[in-house]
Image (cartoon, rainbow, N blue to C red):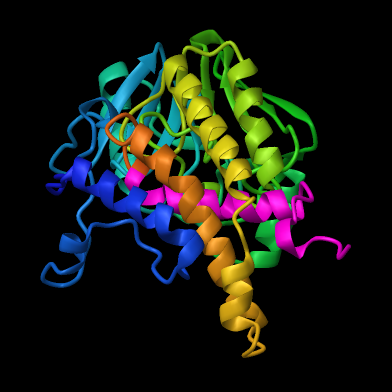
Amino acid sequence: MKPMPWDAPAYRRTLLRTAAALPFAGFTGVALESSAAAADGPGLPDFAPVPAAAIGPELNDSGYFVGRIGGSLHWVTDGFYQAMFLSTREGVVLVDAPPTIGHNLLRAIAEVTRANGRPAKVTHLVYSHSHADHSGASSILGKDVVRIGHVECRRLLLRANDPNRPAPTVTFEDHYTLEVGGERLELAYHGPNHSPDNVFVYAPEHRTLMVVDILYPGWVPFKNIAVSQDIPAWLRAQDIAMGYPWRTLVGGHLGRLGVRADGDLQRAYMADLEASTRASMDLDPQPYFDKYGPQGNSWAIFKTYLDAVAVRAAAPVAAKYTGVLAAADVFTLDNAATLVESFRIDAGLLGPFGTRP
């Protein structure tokens, strides 16, 4: 995708001016954009160019890229999502079936197996987790494929009753080793994080880890900290992922593979955002109570105050990482807002909504 032109210095000045004014004015906007961008044709904001280091390989005419990680291990991307597969002498082991890649998964597998002379049939599908954006093309593989996932993945998919995502028939609770055609994958569950069933998939021979929606090579995490269901556990999952001895990361999203420096950079971004959020939670609440208290509008007090804390927290972090991590100007506010709520609910940092003295 071609990035849109954007004036980074102007953005930083606008955002910092907005944050500086927050104690004296209610926050009503949610987009981090310049005033000029808001006046553009259809009202769509401009964002910072994507750093060259975040951009993946060029897609082919069918809209995908397939590449070798090492030996029989390959990956596929459409620039938005990623899958991984092992081409073995007994068939193909696929990890995830994102619907945006869809039938291009089969085209990519056919491309690889034509070249190496191995079977193109997918015999096993590993679900990283149950979410439809990573598993919604499972049905195109047919009924005979062996589907493998965490026990919670099975429960969630049975509840969903989605014909595009048949529930796994092989499940595990903590660890599972899959061996097919002389190849091996080690599956491990380290507790809930992004989802209740998200697992780590490690290919030891290739020193490659696939863990989805935890690390985003070259980019900031997706909005609301990857729309994760357990924020403290998601934060810990970054460290768990970095504890594996991998050289190559398949993160499940966007256009390129990861290296260890990507994990270090994301953890630095999140550490800065955590620190900025904690420091911003001492924002004076009085203007928000004064404005909306006489109206009896309790939700307006909460909304404007918490939004203001998030903007104050996001401003310096977005400025620091714009041009370093792609989309720092797009999702840092959403990620800060999620941290604000997690700090309140999970860590007990209630601010003006704490125990009345």
The answer, for residue 224, to whether it is visible in the render is: no
Residue 199 sits in which quadrant?
Answer: top right
Q: Is residue 22 left or right of residue 319?
A: right
Among all residues in the image, which is located at the extreme bottom? 295
Q: Is residue 345 left or right of residue 258?
A: right
Q: How many marks?
A: 0
Dominant secondary structure of the residues highlighted in magenta in the image: helix
> Any magenta on residue 342?
yes
Which residue is pictured at 40% across the width and 27% down the height?
Answer: 119
Q: Give the x, y percent position of residue 148.
A: 65, 40
Which residue is pictured at 33% across the width and 46% down the height?
Answer: 329
Above or below: residue 184 compared with residue 128: above
Q: Is residue 198 left or right of residue 265?
A: right
Which residues are drawn in magenta? 329-357
Report the front residue among 102 and 132: 132
Which residue is pictured at 73% across the width and 32% down the height?
Answer: 190
Above or below: residue 311 compared with residue 53: below
Q: Give the x, y percent position of residue 213.
A: 52, 41
Q: Is residue 206 left or right of residue 253?
A: right
Residue 27 sits in which quadrant?
Answer: bottom left
> Any magenta on residue 125?
no
Which residue is pictured at 45% across the width and 23% down the height?
Answer: 265
Report the front residue among 164 and 240: 240
Report the front residue among 276 and 57: 276
Q: Give the x, y percent position of residue 204.
A: 58, 12
The answer, for residue 23, to whether it is visible in the render is: yes
Q: Quadrant of the C terminus?
A: bottom right
Above or below: residue 7 compared with residue 184: below
Above or below: residue 309 compared with residue 124: below
